[in-house]
Image (cartoon, rainbow, N blue to C red):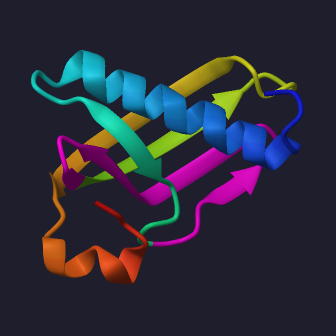
Amino acid sequence: MLELAPEARLEQRCNAKAMGAVAREHKGFHPDELVAYAYGDPTVGDNEIDAPGAAVRSKGQWFHIAYHCRTTADGLEVEAFRYTLGDVIPRAEWDAHALVE
């Protein structure tokens, strides 16, 4: 992961944290993909990312998710994280938001 650019490392680490949290905290969810920019670009700062328009896929369905994540300076450890899982995203919206099957 250290080979990634710092911003990419931050996004990848926080996306993984979001998928792990959803899998642990929502019975029956098995996330396998997350798009941080699905409904708007995330805001990235020093070791922080706000992704209010993200989407997460579980069992072939996409769901809205918003998260805020802060990592250590090297981007490898999450120091603070919160998220809100939203409703299912209708199939008719997938193409317009870079969501794949």
> Which residue appears at 36% of the width and 66% of the height?
99
Q: Residue 74, image x and y in percent?
A: 86, 25
Query: How many marks can you see?
Result: 0
> Which residue appears at 33% of the width and 48% of the height?
56
Is 38 a magenta residue? no
From the image, give the main secondary structure of the stretch colored magenta. Answer: strand
Looking at the figure, which quarter contains the C terminus? bottom left
Res. 59 image quadrant = top left
Res. 9 image quadrant = top right
85 sits to left or right of 7 = left
> Which residue appears at 86% of the width and 26% of the height?
73
Q: Residue 55, image x and y in percent?
A: 36, 55
Q: Residue 65, image x and y in percent?
A: 33, 50
Is 61 a magenta residue? yes
Range covered by the magenta-colored residues: 40-62
Task: Say above or below: 38 vs 81.
Answer: below
Q: Residue 77, image x and y in percent?
A: 70, 17
> Which residue appears at 49% of the width and 72% of the height?
40
Looking at the figure, which quarter contains the N terminus? top right
Task: Say above or below: 82 vs 56.
Answer: above
Q: Nearer the viewer, residue 83 or 64?
A: 64
Q: Residue furthest front?
A: 101
